[in-house]
């Protein structure tokens, strides 16, 4: 469904991505993990057009989408959330939802309200988005990406900075969407969250893929343990 | 029992009817040309500030080059009337040309300037403004140089001149306010406001930011160009320092900030208060700089003490008074949210 091939990206003298190749199958929940600075968000930025790849390509359902503008990437069917939530604080929650809608008609509002109900913040539809708590903002960001019904959803640390009960709530929403056929690529540091949710995990280190496979295989891979997971995770399993 | 929303709507409709009545009868009640002059200028600025607000207020791109369109509209009407020998009331038929020239300038101007943001954008708009002022001075065979261009004679008596211009300016203002309200309610307006909050995020949700910004910039420029033409015909002449006046830009921005940037009524209120006050100060004090000094002082006061302007600040006060003593989260809203998300997310302030 989504594939990157040999993607390279540098910032100044630092190579953020180096020959990075990943694959996300249709209808799967794929995880992307790695230590801080390993290039996870950079890869998201390259896929969604926020950063330009110096080499390599990005494909969506076989179509090359390398280095096209973010609005076109979204229109083609890739929606994303950000590590630090990015909502429109001076717009109401409903208006936030309608930014991603094709029109702002009654049918779009109905659909938007259904998505707000799905993530559990419909009661705040008339409130200014800037007044929401951090957790509610995470849910809003998830909801307004859903409005356009993207083929692939890229979630950048959906469980980051939120309390455990909300982490479970978000995981349940992802499972429901997955059951409905949605494809996900998730960047996350919360190992329990990733291991419990993902069908396949890719591990990045210094911009390079060091391992990829099912969670059970990845968590025992020596290179992964060296690069990122450490003995704590192994001990806890 | 009448609901709060219905009561608010009735109050708003009544207030609008009173305002409309006052606007229509103003030159009939105050027929002195000295007084109607205040009205004409105030309404010209209502249009110009509302046009500025549709682009800058909604998108967050603060333009200090709006005089480019105002002056160009004025010159376009003047030059066309002069070169095509248009006279009498037929010159009003040239006003759409002022709008077209404004929009035509805005497209290449915007294609360059709208690639950058914030301070850089402001600097570019100022630079373009000075380029146009210099062109007006130096392309003398076209613009008349420092002498400028004069408007054709209008066969109206001294008493009807101001009154007719008042109604023309009122029509422009009403149309602009309706356009602004329409834009704000539309998907186009929503996209502009999303760009103001976070342009990159908006792009990631399918908003073609450049196209949206450019359309708003051109719309704003077209209306400003048109009202520049009205101003020229009213004043009967335009020279480089009056057509391309830096104080025009500062006044427009101040009026919008004073009333409330990004709102519909704020720029209208700002123009209706500040422009007559500025004219009064200029007429009252022989030292012409007094009004400019006071304008600067007012600008500082607004930025420091009321950065969101009168309308949003007053709205906040009214909301605070109404909701005094009520819980922060309405019971209905809390009940509507599922327990797991409502509780978990509401308490999450990380």
Image (spheres, coloured by chain):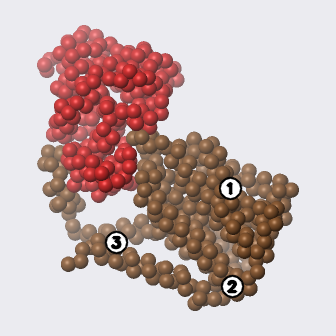
Query: In this figure, which residue is indicated by the disc labeled 2?
Result: B160
Question: From this viewpoint, which residue is outermost toward the top?
Answer: A222
Query: In this figure, which residue is indicated by the disc labeled 3?
Result: B318
- On the image, the x and y values in percent for residue B44 come to 62, 70
Query: In which quadrant will I find the N terminus of chain A?
Result: top left
SS assignment at label 3: helix
Foreground label between 1 and 3: 1
> Chain in brown?
B
Rounded to the nearest angstrom, the CA distance separating label 1 from label 3 is 43 Å
Q: Mark 1, residues whose alpha carbon is within 10 Å: few (<14), some, or many (≥20)? A: many
- On the image, the x and y values in percent for residue B180 come to 49, 62
Rounded to the nearest angstrom, the CA distance separating label 2 from label 1 is 29 Å
Q: How many numbered marks does the figure carry?
A: 3
- On the image, the x and y values in percent for residue B331 come to 16, 61
User: Which circle's residue, 2 or 1, is located before the other in the chain?
Assistant: 1
| Mark 2 chain | B
Point 76% across, 77% down: residue: B154
Query: In this figure, which residue is indicated by the disc labeled 1?
Result: B101
| Mark 1 chain | B
Residue A21's label in the rendered image is: none
Task: Report the front residue among B18 and B275.
Answer: B18
Query: In which quadrant will I find the C terminus of chain A?
Result: top left
| Quarter of the figure with residue B238 | bottom right
Looking at the image, is B54 positioned above or below residue A7? below
| Quarter of the figure with residue B172 | bottom right
> Chain in red?
A
User: Which circle's residue, 2 or 3, is located before the other in the chain?
Assistant: 2
Task: Report the front residue among B205 and B78.
Answer: B78
User: Which circle's residue, 1 or 3, is located before the other in the chain?
Assistant: 1
Task: Report the front residue among B334 and B301.
Answer: B334
Q: Mark 2, residues whose alpha carbon is within 10 Å: few (<14), some, or many (≥20)? A: some
SS assignment at label 2: helix
């Amino acid at each position: 469904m989504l594939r990157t091939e040999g993607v390279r990206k540098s910032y100044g003298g630092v190579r953020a991505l180096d020959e990075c190749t990943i694959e996300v199958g249709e209808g799967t929940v794929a995880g992307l993990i790695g230590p801080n600075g390993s290039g996870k968000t950079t890869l998201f930025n390259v896929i969604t057009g926020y950063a330009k790849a110096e080499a390599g390509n990005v494909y969506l359902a076989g179509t090359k989408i390398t280095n096209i503008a973010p609005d076109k990437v979204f229109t083609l069917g890739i929606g994303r959330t950000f590590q630090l939530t990015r909502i429109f604080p001076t717009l109401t929650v409903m208006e936030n939802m309608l930014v991603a809608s094709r029109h702002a008609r009654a049918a779009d509002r109905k659909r938007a309200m259904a998505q707000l109900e799905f993530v559990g913040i419909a009661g705040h539809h008339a409130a200014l988005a800037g007044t929401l708590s951090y957790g509610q903002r995470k849910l809003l960001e998830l909801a307004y990406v859903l409005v356009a019904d993207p083929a692939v959803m890229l979630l950048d640390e959906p469980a980051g900075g939120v309390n455990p009960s909300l982490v479970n709530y978000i995981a349940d929403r992802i499972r429901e969407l997955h059951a409905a056929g949605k494809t996900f690529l998730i960047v996350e540091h919360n190992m329990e969250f990733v291991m419990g949710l993902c069908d396949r995990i890719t591990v990045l280190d210094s911009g390079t893929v060091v391992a990829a496979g099912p969670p059970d295989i990845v968590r025992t891979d020596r290179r992964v343990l060296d690069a990122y997971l450490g003995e704590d995770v192994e001990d806890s399993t | 029992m009448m609901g709060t929303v219905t009561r608010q709507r009735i109050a708003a409709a009544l207030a609008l009817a009173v305002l409309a009545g006052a606007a229509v009868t103003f030159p009939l009640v105050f027929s002195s040309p000295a007084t109607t002059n205040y009205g004409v200028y105030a309404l010209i600025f209502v249009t110009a500030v509302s046009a500025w607000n549709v682009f800058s207020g909604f998108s967050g791109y603060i333009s200090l080059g709006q005089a480019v369109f105002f002056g160009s509209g004025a010159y376009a009407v003047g030059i066309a009337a002069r070169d095509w020998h248009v006279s009498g009331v037929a010159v009003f038929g040239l006003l759409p040309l002022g709008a077209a020239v404004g929009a035509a300038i805005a497209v290449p101007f915007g294609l360059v300037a709208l690639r950058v943001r914030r301070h850089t954008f402001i600097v570019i708009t100022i630079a373009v403004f000075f380029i146009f002022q210099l062109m007006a001075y130096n392309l003398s065979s076209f613009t008349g140089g420092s002498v400028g261009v004069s408007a054709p004679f209008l066969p109206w008596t001294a008493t009807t001149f101001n009154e007719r211009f008042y109604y023309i300016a009122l029509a422009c203002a009403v149309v602009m306010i309706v356009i602004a309200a329409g834009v704000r309610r539309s998907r186009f307006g929503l996209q502009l406001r999303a760009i103001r909050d976070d342009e990159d995020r908006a792009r990631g949700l399918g908003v073609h930011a450049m196209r949206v910004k450019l359309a708003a910039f051109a719309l704003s420029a077209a209306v400003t160009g048109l009202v520049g033409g009205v101003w020229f015909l009213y004043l009967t002449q335009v020279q480089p320092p009056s057509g391309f006046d830096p104080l025009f830009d500062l006044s427009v921005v101040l009026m919008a900030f004073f009333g409330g940037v990004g709102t519909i009524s704020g720029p209208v209120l700002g123009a209706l208060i500040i422009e007559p006050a500025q004219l009064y100060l200029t007429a009252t004090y022989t030292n012409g700089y007094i009004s400019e000094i006071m304008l600067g002082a007012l600008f500082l006061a607004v930025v420091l003490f009321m950065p969101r302007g009168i309308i949003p600040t007053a709205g906040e006060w009214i909301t605070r008074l109404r909701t005094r003593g009520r819980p922060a989260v309405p019971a209905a809203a809390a009940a509507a949210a599922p327990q797991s998300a409502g509780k978990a997310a509401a308490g999450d302030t990380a």
